[in-house]
Amino acid sequence: MKLNTSEYARASNKPLLLLVVGLAIAASNPTRAPAQQTQTVPSATASDPAKKDFTEEWVYRVQYGHKDEWWKIFKKYQIAILERQKQLGYVKDFTVWGPGLHTDESSRWDYRVIIVRASYDAPPGQSEGEVGKQLFPDQETFKREENRRWELTANHWDLPIHVVRIDSAE
């Protein structure tokens, strides 16, 4: 679509006009009580990294022939803990990935879990260990079954990850 100069001037002034009208309406409404005013939450800044989202990737390679047993234990405990942390607000989201094809053994992985947390540090009562104790009071069974899962894990690593912005210098 091609705009001539006068059409461009009218189109580019619409946001400004809407802003002015909105400010005029807001200023002409003195009956709004202070308690009704919208509270803004300070956004996270580079100087406050504790309030910045933290994304982490868990990668697992399971011993051949034990994927079903490993997954059953992982789902029972780790997925339950992540779900509870999500309910509490510490985990914003998580996704479990499995490979679509095969690779050579050196780069093989069976599960990747991408977790977006509200911050690096867990609030009181919301860490993995604390939530695990809340959800699974039989800690002897919990530890025994989690140890079995680790016996079935051939390789594992946790990686803090971030989105690379292609339009900025990084």
Image (cartoon, grey):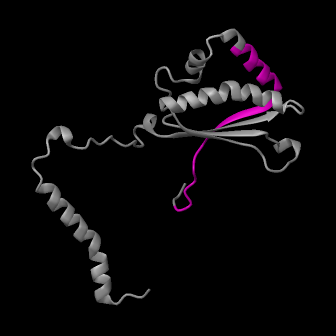
| Residue 46 drawn at (x, y percent) | 42, 43
Quadrant containing the N terminus in the rendered view: bottom left
Quadrant containing the C terminus in the rendered view: bottom right
Residue 15 lies left or right of residue 146; in this view the side is left
Q: Does residue 103 lie above or below 91 as drawn?
A: below
| Residue 62 drawn at (x, y percent) | 82, 33
Which residue shows up at 48% across the image and 36% down it? 118
Using the rendered view, name the quadrant where residue 142 is placed.
Answer: top right
Q: Is residue 42 visible?
A: yes
Which residue shows up at 42% across the image and 88% down it? 2
Residue 56 lies left or right of residue 167; in this view the side is right
Which residue shows up at 48% across the image and 32% down it? 89
111 magenta-colored: no
| Residue 122 drawn at (x, y percent) | 50, 27
User: From which residue to which does the magenta span run?
Assistant: 142-167
Q: Nearer the viewer, residue 102 or 135?
A: 135
Residue 7 lies left or right of residue 154; in this view the side is left
153 magenta-colored: yes
Q: Is residue 153 visible?
A: no
